[in-house]
Amino acid sequence: MTAPRPQLLMGLSILAAVLNLALKSVAYRVTGSVGLLADAGESVVNVVAALAALLTLVYAARPVDRDHTYGHEKIEYFSSGLEGMLILVAACAIVWFALRRLFVPEELESLGVGSGFTFAATVINLGVGLLLIRAGRRAQSIVLEADGRHLMADVVTSAGVLLGLGLVWLTKLTWLDTIVALLVAGHIGWTAIDLIRRSFDGLMDRALPEEEQAKVRAAIAGLLAPGMDFHALRTRRAGTRRFADFHLLVPGIFTVRRAHEITERIEKAIRVALPDMEVTVHVEPIEERAAWEDSALVPLEQAARQARGEV
């Protein structure tokens, strides 16, 4: 079965966000709950974030060109960072409205009707959010996963608000609506910080996880003959694509053809270990001193090798 296109999934997210905004706005109007007002405010953020994510996916799908020779996928980190900032703004807005209501309390009305609208919106967000997270992880798309996590944060928000409304209805203590809203704001803020951190890592070309780097090193080392070595391994990710480059040190007497054949075998082994990896190899004579002094990574790697007890 063919997976849905990312653009189609984002279109579904936009539709869900607009429907959520309508339902939660009605819920706030009939109840006057500050929690529901904050929840509706987050739905506005959802609409803006989903539109930004859709535009990002369209742009990221463009092929390489003369000005963007590595492709356009890295824009996904801008989108997920923006989404994280919007979630953080939503969390701050919830705190502001909640504290305001704490000092200026108001009676809540028609809690049953408002809860019904909010529950319907929550079910929609739950279904679409889970779908986006699964699709994002399967396609390794941070944009889809970020939007899915945003929707799941909204689910938690709505659940907390519904809990608060239930407690208010049972106890008649209206300040409980404010307390629950503040707790939910803390959860949303943590989600936002995590998304911003991941986006920052992507924009700063953070290396691949250590387990993936270990697979690359093992693939290279497995094809090195005596008298050969490698160093200056660099890895990064841009959207769904992984990149790796390193220096392959071979005896100076090797012909270009022989060095190329070894390089081809190593690149194939790396792509078997990590599919769709784009590999760049720089071949150098192992006897030349300059080959060991041409990268700031060499001293770091040598220290790491000594720590592992390697020669």
Image (cartoon, rainbow, N blue to C red):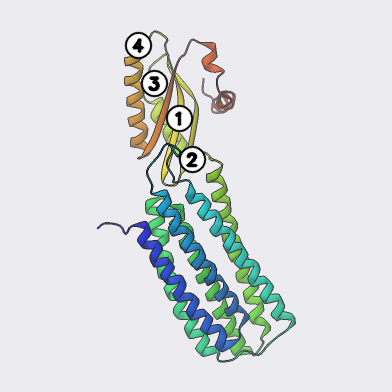
Crowding near the residue tagged with mark 4, few <14, some 14–19, many ≥20 C-alpha atoms within 10 Å? few
Say which residue appears at 61% left-offset and 83% top-offset: 33
Q: In the image, what residue type sits under mark 1?
A: Asp
Which SS class for mark 1?
A: strand
Q: Badge 1 is on which residue?
A: 245
Question: Disc number at residue 158?
Answer: none
Crowding near the residue tagged with mark 2, few <14, some 14–19, many ≥20 C-alpha atoms within 10 Å? some
Residue 151 visible in rendering: yes
Residue 152 visible in rendering: no
Q: In the image, what residue type sits under mark 2?
A: Leu
Residue 56, percent across and down? 45, 54
In the depicted structure, whether residue 40 falls above or below residue 304: below
Q: In the image, what residue type sits under mark 4?
A: Thr
Pick the residue in front: 107 or 309. 107
Q: In the image, what residue type sits under mark 3?
A: Leu
Q: Badge 3 is on which residue?
A: 224
Crowding near the residue tagged with mark 1, few <14, some 14–19, many ≥20 C-alpha atoms within 10 Å? some
Residue 127, percent across and down? 40, 70
Q: Badge 2 is on which residue?
A: 208
Which SS class for mark 2?
A: loop
How far apart are the two marked residues, 3 and 1, measured between alpha carbons? 16 Å
How far apart are the two marked residues, 4 and 1, measured between alpha carbons? 21 Å
Q: Earlier in the sequence, mark 2 or mark 4?
A: 2
* Residue closest to the far left: 1
How far apart are the two marked residues, 2 and 4, measured between alpha carbons? 33 Å
Pair 2/4: label in front = 4
Residue 240, percent across and down? 41, 46
Say which residue appears at 35% left-offset and 62% top-offset: 8
In the depicted structure, whether residue 297 falls above or below residue 272: above
Q: Earlier in the sequence, mark 3 or mark 1?
A: 3
Which SS class for mark 4?
A: loop
Relative horizontal placement of residue 216, taking residue 199 as reference (left or right)? left
